[in-house]
Image (tube, rainbow, N blue to C red):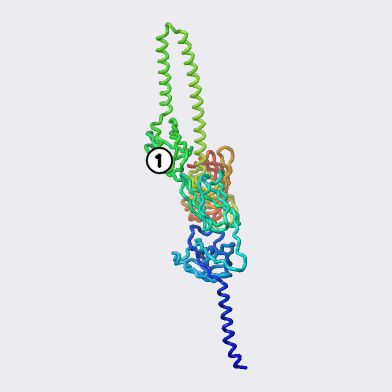
Amino acid sequence: MIKQIAYLKPLLFLLALCLYCQNLSAQQTATVKSFIQTTDHIPVGDRRNDLNGTPCALVKVQVVDDIERVEGNKIGDIINHGVEKWVYMCKGSRNMRIHFKNHLPIRVTFRDYKINGLESNRVYELVVNTPNQPGPAPVQVQGSNLQMRVSPSNATITIWGDNYQRQSHRPQDDGTLRVYLPYGRYHYLAKADGYNDMEGSVFVNDENKWEDIRLQAITGTLSVECNTQGVDFYLNNELLLKNKSDTHWIGPIEPGEYHIEARKKDYITKSQRITITANQIAYANFGQLLTKSEQKRIEQQKLKEEKDKAKTEADALAKKKEKEIAKVKEEQKKQKAKEEALRKEEHAKQAKIKREERIKKLEIKDKKSVVLGVTAGYNMAAAAFSNDYDGETESVSSFHAGLTIDFRLSKSFYLASGLLFSIKGYEYENRRNDIREKGDAQYIDIPIQASIRFPLGHQTKLQLNAGPYIALCVGGTVKDDYYNSLYDESFSSAYSGFDYGLQGGIGADINYHFHIGVNYQLGMASSYQNRNLMIGIGYRF
């Protein structure tokens, strides 16, 4: 019996070997058709990082089979998009081994396709061919619309892919383009006259998303020239050059139609229409600008010449055509009245333009991020003491002056500060103990206030200010009259030379430059606490 079992072992081994070979022959080998690095970067919503926080590379495997697992520096699970599977791998990966459900595994060495290692945050395409085999029905490749928004709308879009030959398409008038394509990766090239070419790639699936294509215009150059000194040049009513003369070159400028003007105060404005074309230079020469008085003299000279000519002709025909002379004079009066009316109309038009320019300049200044100014005003100062005093403390009058600075953080919110010289103090009297004391303190104040500003009428803003302040005593004395003994000492010796506290108030900006306001300081120093009401006016540059 033992000998029979010994003979069966080789037979069982041969049977197992035959079954294994039959299984291998049933599975066929997949092959790599192509492996490339695309021009795409991974969208923010699709990114993954490795254990060190470095963004991964994305390998999009296009294969008509299921992937069971991937060996290599893979991060996370495989994402199945039908015939396209997304595999995230670490930066610098050099190979991968893919195990399929119905085909033998394959090993892809990236160096064989001129890629030494995967780059971070880049997209790669791996196309795998799988031979036909019996078994489950092949996967039916579906399709969807490739949807694009194209600017400019006259561009030509050329699209191609592995199963789609190169074809050119034109967007509709609104710039939209829809092309029905099978699922998969496609490349496109966008071209338009006067614009730089644009290349890219896109994946078509059932997500029904739009691809935005905006071509960058090829720019041109503008040359402006004027023989008058101190001229401002405006392009489409926007300041282009300020206080210039001679010839200046401006670029790059997008192709198109433009309106350019040469302006100077008390001079007649000149304007031209110019066309900027790609890779070309457009010239605008304004020559010499004339003042209003010069223009008026030219018009008057022209009018005088016309009158002299009319008078000469009238004298020659005086004896024969007296009626015609009267008619000519009447026409001249009407012409003069018409010219006067035109001059008044032009004067009113120029006045309106000046008002609009003045308002526009104020609006531009109001948008400055940092604004300097000066201020000065009246102080009504008093004090509070940490010790208990039986007497009465009265306020004293003084002044403050210095610099201000505003930081514009938003349309209505500012940070207001400055550097102020401010005289403060107090008067104290205790009649019961016959004590009289007067403090005269000179401070350098630095307020730091949050300022909320609201429009209030035409070119006027209301301010609400609040915040801390710090102050450094730089001078002053304390004079005492105690039991008929007079003495004085420096203020910083009697009290602390440093003060701090809270400050708040209300104010108004008028016509951008002028400011009035009321602020109250509440000192919080330990030994001596200032109380100061400040009324000031200021000017902003």
Tell me what residue is drawn at x 59 percent, y 56 percent.
143
Relative to the observer, which residue lies in front, 323 or 233?
323
Horizontal relation, residue 78 to residue 221: left or right: right
Position above or below: 99 against 342? below
Residue tagged by mark 1?
281
Q: Which SS class for mark 1?
A: strand
* Neighbour tally class for label 1: few under 14, some 14-19, many 20 plus, Cα within 10 Å: some
Percent from the top left, x then y, of residue 16?
58, 81
Horizontal relation, residue 385 to residue 234: left or right: right
Relative to the observer, which residue lies in front, 191 or 91?
191
What residue type is disc 1 on?
Ile
Percent from the top left, x then y, of residue 284?
41, 36
Q: Quadrant of residue 2?
A: bottom right
Question: Would residue 135 be visible to someone looking at this image?
Answer: yes
Relative to the observer, which residue lies in front, 494 or 199?
199
Percent from the top left, x then y, of residue 472?
48, 53
